[in-house]
Each structure stands twice: as C-alpha cells, then as structure tokens.
Image (cartoon, helix red, strand yellow):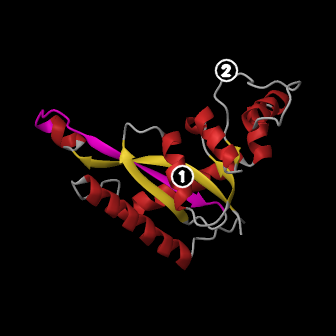
Amino acid sequence: GPIDVVVDSTGLKVYGAGEWRSQAYQTPKRKAWRKLHLSINAATQEIVAEALTTNRIDDADVVPELLTQVETPVTRLYGDGAYDKWKLYDGLAQAEIEPVIPPRRGAAIRKHGNCAGPRLPRDEALRGMRQMGRKRWKQHSGYHRRSLVETSMSRLKQAFGPRLKNKGFENQRTEARLRCKLLNRFTRLGLPKFKWN
C-alpha cells in the first residue's frame, strides 16, 4: 500500500589527507566529498531511493529523482528546512503527496484564508506553528519521524565507513547504491529492540 517517506542527505568523503597528517606535515587540505540523498520508508526503515550527487546540488532538487525510484505510491514526505522550497511544494502537489516540512523562520503566508481555492500545505504549517508553537507543531504533525533517516545514515556510516573507496564518480554512485542495498538486507534481518525498565 501507500507509504510515508523521509528524505535527507549526508556527506561522504572522497579523498584528502586526514586532519593529523595535514597538521603533521603542513600539507594543504585537499578535501572533496559527495552528497548521498536517501529516502526511507518510515514504517520499515528500509531505503527506498538513493542518489549520489556533488556537494553543490540543492537537496530539494533531488527529491523528484528520489520519488521516481519509489515503486509504491507515496502519501506523505517528511523533510527538514532544506526542503522548504516552493518548486518542491508544487511538484508534491501535482503528485498528491502531503509535505511535512517546517517552514523557515521568518516565512510569510503566501495565500491568505480569504483567497479562493484549496489552502497550501506550507501556509497551513505556518498557521499551525503560530497557533501551537514550533515544538508542539512538530509533535502534532509527526515531524519527528524525520529522525529515522538520520538513524539510517548513521547505520550506513557505522557499517561501511564515512568515506567512498572509488575515485570515479560513476563508480562512487555504484558503490553508494550497493551500500544501500546491503543496509536494507541488514535491516530486513532485524533491528535492535530496546526495552526500558
């Protein structure tokens, strides 16, 4: 059936001398890194879409590519403030996906209540924040489910390290895809269950 997805990105190092080495030998730091964009199923915590890009690509620009990889219909998309872009809201509206994205501080309502037509999700989020406060809006909207993708990124880096081994960009994409598939295999085997006393 339809699923809720959580999106975010993390950085993976590609090459460059380590901190100790660059200080010890006074070599200039030559660092490069890639952005790994992940979309996970909020219910199962499996990675349903991934994309590796350069570090200059905006997070919101990658979401359409991620959504095309998801095979099941998507009901809701959770993201952080980096995804608060009107072009993304417009694309999600066309795909009939509900965004759960906190508007940036200082954001203004675009379409006021007396305007004709349906209300915009971003405006509704702003109204909710003004009525309840930012913290209570996050609890009410379920925004904290977004932390699931951060947990997945942490597990990915713990299992495979924070550095890509390949130098070529296409090979790095393949490496990232393989890491995500292996992490899904680990997830299917079982996640740790915590029991509070």
User: Which label belongs to residue 165?
Assistant: none
Is there any visible trace of residue 151 in the rendered image?
no
Residue assigned mark 1? 150
> Which callout, 2 or 1, points at the residue further toward the start of the chain?
2
Q: Residues within 10 Å of mark 1 (few under 14, many from 20)?
A: some
Residue assigned mark 2? 106
The amino acid at mark 2 is: Gly
Secondary structure at numbered mark 1: helix
Residue 137 in the image: state x and y as whole percent: 78, 38
Residue situated in front as seen by the camera: 3 or 141: 3
Which residues lie in the magenta part?
A: 24-42
Residue situated in front as seen by the camera: 35 or 150: 35
Image height check: is 27 above or below 180?
A: above
Query: Considering the image in quadrants, where does the C terminus appear?
Result: bottom right
Q: Residue at x 30, y 48 (%)?
A: 13
Q: Is residue 193 left or right of residue 16?
A: right
